[in-house]
Amino acid sequence: MKLNCDLGESFGAWTMGLDSEVMPYIDQANIACGFHGGDPLVMQKTLALAKQYQVSVGAHPSYPDLVGFGRRSMACSSEQIIALIHYQVAALDGMAKVQGLTVDYVKPHGALYNDMMVKPEVFNAILTALAQYPKKLTLMLQATADLAEYKKQASKLGVDVYSEAFADRCYDDKGRLLARSQAGAVLTKPAMLAQVKQLSEQGSVTTISGKVLKLSVDSLCVHGDNISAVQAIREIKDLMR
C-alpha cells in the first residue's frame, strides 16, 4: 500500500501545506493544476521536489473554483468536465516533461472527486477524458464496497484504477467517508493510526457502526497541512514498513 498526498496547492503569496516536509515520506504526489490551487511557479517547484525524492506524479484537477478551493460542486456538462480535465492534466504533463518527469495518474480534487463517486455522468466524463488523453493515465478513486463495478466501467474504456483509502476519516457501512458534518467523521490521531494498522495488516476498516468492512486498497491518502500532520505521516510510514 502506497502513500499519496495532495500537494502544490499554494498560489501567489498564499501558502498551503508543508510540501517540502511531506515529500520525503510519500510515494505519490497529487499536484494541483491551477483551478483550485497552485500556479505555474508552485507547480514547477513541486515537480522538482517530486523528482528529488523519486515520487510518482499525479495530476490533481478540480472544478474551476479558486475562491472555494474546489470544494463546491458545479453544474458542469460532460463536455465541460472532459475539457477541464484535459486542460489541467496537459498543463502539469507539459511542465513535468520539462523536468524529465511524467504524469502517471489523475486524482480529481474536492467536489469533483466527490461528484465522481456518486454521479455516474461525472464518473463517465472523467473516464472519457482519461481514455481520450494521448498517453496512458490511471484514475485514482475511493475504495468502496462497489469498487469492482467502478473498475468494470473503467475497463470498458481501457482505463486502469488505483483505489485509495483515507488515513484520518471514518467510514460508513458502504465504505464511503462519513460526512464531515457528522460526529466522529475525522479520526483522532490514535484512531487514525489504529485504522492504518488495520488496513495494512487486515485489509479492512471498522465502520462507524462497528462493522468490519473489507477494502481493496492500493494507496493511502495522508495530509500534510501542519507540523503535527507531518509527524503523523512519519508514524504511518513506520507502521507500514
Image (spheres, rainbow, N blue to C red):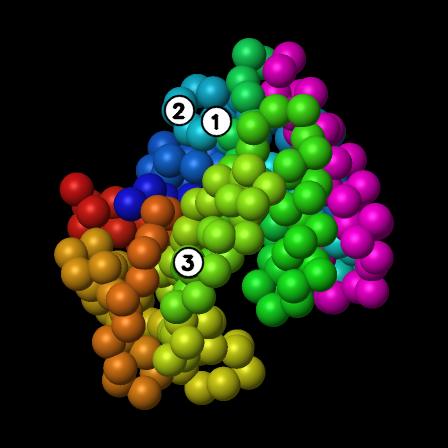
* Secondary structure at numbered mark 2: loop
Q: Give the range drawn in magenta.
A: 70-98
Q: Nearer the viewer, residue 194 or 88?
A: 88
Residue 40, placed above or below residue 2:
above
- Residue 187 left/right relative to 151: left
Q: Give x and y (percent) for residue 13.
A: 73, 41
* Secondary structure at numbered mark 1: helix
Instruction: Give the residue drawn at x 83%, y 49%.
Output: 79
Residue 182, placed above or below residue 88:
below
Instruction: Give the residue drawn at x 18%, y 50%.
Output: 239
Mark sitting on residue 50: 1
Residue 173 in view of the camera: yes
Query: Which quadrant, please, contains the N terminus?
Result: top left
Which amino acid lies under the numbered mark 2 shown in the image of this protein? Tyr
Residue hosting label 3: 148
Assess whether mark 2 and mark 1 are in contact (beta carbons under 8 angstroms).
Answer: yes
Where is residue 22, by image quadrant? top left
> Magenta span has 129?
no
Where is residue 192, by image quadrant? bottom left
Disc with the residue nearer the chain's start (1 vs 3): 1
